[in-house]
Image (cartoon, grey):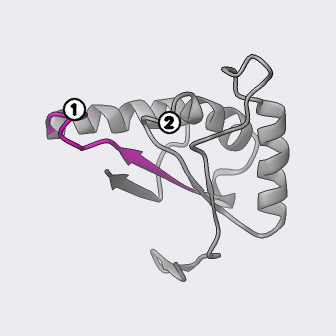
Amino acid sequence: MNEFFGTTMPKLGFGLMRLPRLADGKTIDIEQCEAMTDAFLNAGMRYFDTAYVYEGSEEATRRFLVGRHPRESFYLADKVNASPWAAKSADEAKRELAVSLERTGAGYFEALRCF
């Protein structure tokens, strides 16, 4: 992925599907996510990827990435589940997108994928 909307991008992205959890196995470890995010950004990487269906990921992303780093310092992609068993219509997919924007607090996504 050398070219992303006219911007040169590193080839490595940070997938936010399986974030580290606390000992209870349910709560996302925000402190560890902060450290991982900071290390990723400090290494010159900028691309993060989450999804509507990644349980807790979008809300956590708001806390450890969006709320702590200038919006222009990273790229954030999201995915809407447009498969037959998920969003049943374009309107429902648009609603999922609106929810994702609210959960992340990002304001916009550099990329949106349907899966």
110 shown above or below 8: above
From the viewer's perspective, tell me whether residue 101 is left or right of residue 106: left
Residue at image position (56%, 43%) is 17
Whether residues under marks 1 and 2 lie with C-beta atoms below 8 angstroms apart, the answer is: no
Residue at image position (70%, 21%) is 27
| Percent coordinates x, y for residue 48 in the rendering | 60, 55
The secondary structure that dominates the magenta segment is: loop
From the viewer's perspective, tell me whether residue 1 is left or right of residue 46: left
- According to the picture, the residue beneath numbered tag 2 turns out to be 54
Q: Nearer the viewer, residue 93 or 67?
A: 93
Q: Nearer the viewer, residue 77 or 12?
A: 12
Amino acid type shown at disc 2: Tyr
| Percent coordinates x, y for residue 112 in the rendering | 38, 54
- According to the picture, the residue beneath numbered tag 1 turns out to be 92
Q: Nearer the viewer, residue 49 or 91?
A: 49
Residue at image position (70%, 43%) is 65
Q: Let me know if residue 64 is in the magenta part.
A: no
Q: Local crowd at mark 2 within 10 Å, few (<14), some, or many (≥20)?
A: some
| Percent coordinates x, y for residue 7 in the rendering | 55, 78
Count of marks placed on residues: 2
The residue most toward the left is: 89
Q: Which residues are magenta?
A: 76-89
Residue at image position (55%, 42%) is 106
Q: Let me know if residue 87 is in the magenta part.
A: yes
From the viewer's perspective, tell me whether residue 108 is left or right of residue 15: left
From the viewer's perspective, tell me whether residue 97 is left or right of residue 69: left
39 shown above or below 107: below
The circle on residue 65 is none
Which of the marked residues, 1 or 2, is nearer the chain's N terminus?
2
Amino acid type shown at disc 1: Glu
Q: Local crowd at mark 1 within 10 Å, few (<14), some, or many (≥20)?
A: some
- Dividing the picture into quadrants, the one containing residue 63 is top right
